Amino acid sequence: LTRCSRGASGRPLLFKSKQVPVAYFIALPAATGLASYTSSAMVLGRSVSFISAMILGARLLGSGAFTMAPRAVRPSGVGHFGAFSRVGGVRLSAADTTDGAGSAESAAVGEAGGGDAPRMRVRQIQDSDASQVVGKEVYLKGWVRTLRAQKSLAFIEVNDGSSRQGLQAVVDASSCPSFDAVSTLSTGAAVSVRGVVVESPGKGQKYELSARVVELVGACPDDYPLQKKRHSLEFLRTIAHLRPRTNTIAAVARVRSVLAFATHEFFQGEGFSYLQSPLITASDCEGAGEMFRVTTLPANIKELPLTEDKSSIDFKEDFFGKAAYLTVSGQLSGETYACALGDIYTFGPTFRAENSQTTRHLAEFHMIEPEMAFCDLDGAMNNAEEYVKFAVRRALEKCADDLKFFNDFYDKTLLDRLSRLRDEPFKRLEYKEAVKLLQAEIAKDPTKWQYPEVNFGTDLATEHERWLSETWAGGRCCFVYNYPRTIKAFYMRDNADGGGEGGTEGTVAACDLLVPGIGELIGGSQREERYDVLVEKMEEFGLDPKDYWWYLDLRKYGSVPHAGYGLGFERLVCYVTATDNIRDAIAFPRFPGNAEF
């Protein structure tokens, strides 16, 4: 054999036989028996058939050109050979390589890279019973969090990102020939440690690693900005490429991952189809005009194409033949598929060019937007409640340690809030009743309120929403529904209420879900399915029905009542992790004046 290697992922690569230069084989994990091995041989040459490969494979096995033995497949991520070079389920001894140099190289890599010891993640070790891991030789790979080194003894806390807590590796010079490598380590350095898992006598940790081999994988100089001290979240935003290595941001990322998976798990379990809606659109779903333009027109003003009257840019000359934007919502696309598949959901990035520097807004964020055919507003609220409860339940089940960290260091009421959300039904309140409650409360002392003017038609502010959920609802989530039509989008279905307060203003079948500590988490509605009514509303809102001809076709061909909602995913992450600033709930926040990293 001339070469046998693995890629960075640890997956088997191809190896080549000298006897047949055009034949390449890939050996797959196989059970015992000649037929299993020969059927695993695959030819990738132009002139050698698969049958020839099977025959050749049998001859090579029979002649002893190389030896094969069934082996357990190494866990993914272990990217080195051991004392025996292996490809999948095949073991190749060092003596079977082409020359002495190759053998020496394989042996050296094997000593440094893992031998027969599997790599285990910190969380995997911590969550295992003693009978499963104690006495087992494993590889631990990660980054040094803390290091205490003495003359012949060292303690290294290694964290690999799988858990908030790291695993301590105890390095004793008498049992670790590579003890000198400890002197090359520092906080932040990448390290590989091979050792035996033992029960720890230390307080607050179940296991530790008795190190046999320590290897520096990537050095970390003294100017590493994340030394062992507490850093402000404001400072960490300036080094967003390194902040995932901190306890707080890493915990947020793990919880976010679980919430994202729970989203797909819930909707797939309910029979919804996942739709990838377009990011580039010519439609302003919200009608607010706060959209990022997408264009390939020249940046030089003198070269811009103009309309005949020279009054504006001629976007007919642009890439799409019209003005195009980054989407603010996947809802309109979602409705088209809901009116064919029944129930769908979208989950992807959306964009809003809102010049806001608040802790609740981002220019790029993610929306979860289900659309349900043959559904009304009550059905949408029921589904939204079930989804939020499901996602929080999964976070409590799978992120207990991270949530305890947030409860201990950021919000002492977090676990209680999440448990109540999971267990208690959401309350529901009509908008007009919410206005009356707020008016009565504000009248007691208007000076306590930033926005004391609340009337029918007022777009409720965050302080109003939080009072309703935290005080009126007693710390429970609550839906406010049937909003004035003048403060909601054109696509929301008009209620047959003959007008609102005083009979002067109608309402729409819309709802907002308000949660303690956040305010609005979800906005939803029953969609206007009546063709004539929708055309009138588009004109009323200053929209050209011709731009939405395809959307109107849904009301023209087999129209059905349907409803949906949108949930800002980053706001959900903030709520579950007690994160005050939404810029800490996403990997690389985009907001006015900032597009770093």
Image (tube, helix red, strand yellow):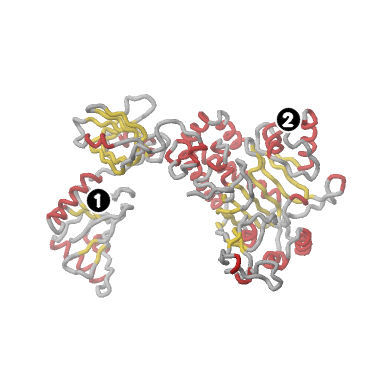
Quadrant containing the N terminus is bottom left
Name which residue lies at 26% across and 73% down: 49
Other residues around mark 1 within 10 Å, as few (<14) / some (14–19) / many (≥20): some
Picture coordinates of residue 22 (x, y %)? 23, 70
Residue wearing tag 1:
71
Residue type (three-letter) at the residue carrying disc 1: Arg
| SS at badge 2 | helix
Picture coordinates of residue 538 (x, y %)? 75, 61
Name which residue lies at 22% across and 28% down: 152
Instruction: Tell me the quarter of the picture where residue 179 sits.
Output: top left
For this rendering, which residue is in front, 198 or 365?
365
For this rendering, which residue is in front, 283 or 395?
283
| SS at badge 1 | loop
The answer to whether 529 appears left or right of 206 in the picture is: right
Picture coordinates of residue 587 (x, y %)? 49, 46
Is tag 1's residue or tag 2's residue first in the polypeptide sequence? 1
Residue type (three-letter) at the residue carrying disc 2: Lys
Labels 1 and 2 touching (C-beta < 8 A): no
Residue 557, visible in the rendered structure: no
Determine whether 187 is above or below 257 in the image.
above
Name which residue lies at 47% across and 44% down: 240
Name which residue lies at 57% across and 49% down: 365
The answer to whether 317 appears left or right of 528 in the picture is: left
Circle 1 or circle 2, nearest the eye: 2
Outermost residue on the bottom side: it is 47
Instruction: Tell me the quarter of the picture where residue 533 sits.
Output: bottom right
Q: CA distance from mark 1 to mark 2?
A: 71 Å
User: Which dot marks residue 448?
Assistant: 2
